[in-house]
Image (tube, rainbow, N blue to C red):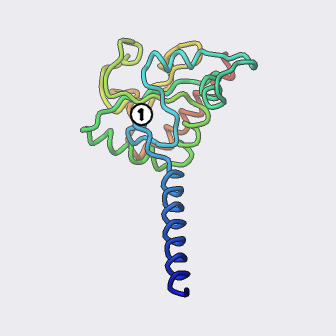
Amino acid sequence: MMLHSASALCLLLVTVSSNLAIAIRKEKRPPQTLSRGWGDDITWVQTYEEGLFYAQKRLSPYSFVSLAVQKLLSKKPLMVIHHLEDCQYSQGLKRVFAQNEEIQEMAQDKFIMLNLMHETTDKNLSPDGQYVPRIMFVDPSLTVRADITGRYSNRLYTYEPQDLPLLIDNMKKALRLIQIEL
């Protein structure tokens, strides 16, 4: 009888522990493929056209769209990051961008985010050439903010890892400008 009880207890423990392991595995959020390493907790749009649509979209409070999508659709500037996987400068910027809590929080809560590894047909996104990494802002009126630049005169929209304070300031500037101008 005692052997039977011990066997039943062992079987019960194995079942509970395997179910617990499955539950824990399900809770882990898999990396979002659209992030490409720039921030898995950020909601990313797939295309430039989708980003423009969401940047100018305003939903009715009676909309049947999910809360996550409503949050994404509220009037926010679009931040476009042009980069390449095999570019050491893009990789360096991506690493510090993904690790910076302030940038990650602002990107998730206050911007529509897009990262591109190819050029768009909108020539306004390459006013001084097609180079990477390049970060541009588009306001909800669909104006590319050519006035929000990095620190280099020959590549106005590039940022290096040590330029994160300037990038943070420029993100805040993009948010201020939509409050003032729109």
- Amino acid type indicated by mark 1: Leu
Q: Position of residue 124 (x, y in %)?
A: 41, 13
Q: Position of residue 161 (x, y in %)?
A: 39, 45
Q: Is residue 159 left or right of residue 23?
A: left
Q: Is residue 178 left or right of residue 16?
A: right
Q: Is residue 41 above or below residue 176?
A: below
Tell me which residue sits at (37%, 28%) in the image: 82
Front-lying residue, 47 or 24: 24
Front-lying residue, 165 or 27: 27
Number of callouts in the render? 1
The residue wearing badge 1 is 34
Please tell me whether mark 1 sits on a helix, a strand or a loop.
helix
Q: If the image is split into quadrants, where does the N terminus sit?
A: bottom right
Q: Position of residue 26 (x, y in %)?
A: 51, 51
Q: Which residue is farthest right?
A: 62
Q: If the image is split into quadrants, where does the C terminus sit?
A: top right
